[in-house]
Amino acid sequence: MDELVTGDAVVLGLRPARLPSRALAIAIDLAVLLTVFVLLSVGLAVATATLDEAAVAAIAVATFLLVLVGGPVAVETLTHGRSLGKLACGLRVVRDDGGPIRFRHALVRGAMGMVEILGTFGVVGCIASLVSARGRRLGDVFAGTLVVRERVPAGRSLAVPPPPPWLVGRFAQLDLSGVPDGLWLAVRQYLTRMNQLDVTVRGSMAQQLSLDLAARTGVPVPQGVPAAAYLAAVVNERQQRDVRRVVAAAGRTGEVPGIRPVPVGRDVSGGRPVEAGRTDSSRTSAFSPTLDSTQDSTRSAPEGPPPTGFAPPA
């Protein structure tokens, strides 16, 4: 696995960038910086034509350091690791833990880049990137950073596998309010990628995550339930609660997201009028709720606003 994994076993889904894409991004950045440096040097040469040679040399050195060293540092600091070349290639500089870089990270990378890229024409940077398992150059090693790919194929996202049928609804009374979002993310990422892990690593990670989840809920893992199945069942229970919460909120407002209520007295299929409160059994869909046979059919409808056609949440 070459995805970026944090200390909480959270796979961030960002792959480390390799030498070809990094070299292209650096070439774009250098082309822009050299263009700015040449234009600025010409302007300063015209403006300082009356100065002596020592002053002109000092201004030239200051311009070189300001543009070719200070420019990348400022850009990476302000854009949180996205220079023009990295933006064009879909790359970004992040910390080792996946967080955004700060000024000190950009400063170390810029200072080391002056030596390994400008001083050696990129030879040292290429060798270091090829030797490193994650494609890091010396500036990344000293700064504690990593260049990753931001653009990943949309098809790489995987759904959480469903739990075994005999575990569905078993954790309906479990208190999930104390589980932090980071742990939920770790469990979801593990479930979507557990088939890609080694059997030993997969078992140990599932055991550790299940123990952490049980500690947050205050209820131990039931005996005889595999750790991975327990995680899938608890995640499924949380998803079901989220769905019920959305439906309940939609029921209070009278609208369900993505569904248009049908006005009373109008049949949307043929346009013919129907009586209010009457159900046409010939047009019942497989997704429509069926009436309980024990329901009292003689009960009259309560007075008040007309029904919306949606059953209130349980």
Image (tube, rainbow, N blue to C red):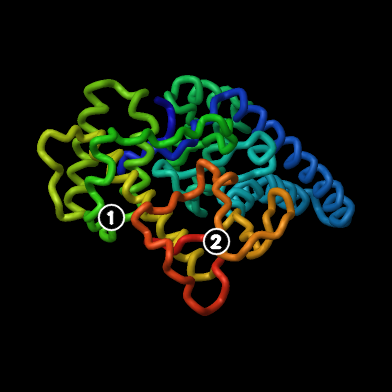
CA gap, disc 2 and disc 1: 36 Å
Crowding at mark 1 (Cα within 10 Å: few <14, some 14-19, many 20+): some
> Which one is nearer the viewer's eye here, 239 or 8?
239
Numbered circles on residues, count: 2
Q: Position of residue 284 (x, y in %)?
A: 55, 46
Instruction: Say what amino acid the circle numbered 1 marks.
Output: Val
Q: Amino acid at mark 2?
A: Gly
Q: Which residue is mark 2?
A: 309
Q: Is 303 located above or below residue 127 in the figure?
A: below
Give residue 155's quadrant in the image: top right
Describe the element under mark 1 as helix, strand or loop: loop
For image coordinates 33% across by 28% down, the residue present is: 194
Q: Secondary structure at mark 2?
A: loop
Measuring from the top left, give residue 143's x and y in whole percent: 44, 43
Pick whichever, 91 or 141, lies toward us.
91
Residue to which mark 1 is pinned = 179
Residue at image position (22%, 55%) is 173
Give me the disc on residue 25.
none
**Up-down: is 180 above or below 33?**
below
Circles 2 and 1, Cβ within 8 Å, touching? The answer is no
Q: Which image quadrant: the C terminus?
A: bottom left
Q: Is residue 309 above or below residue 208?
A: below
Q: Residue at x 55, y 34 (%)?
A: 149
* Residue at far front of view: 298
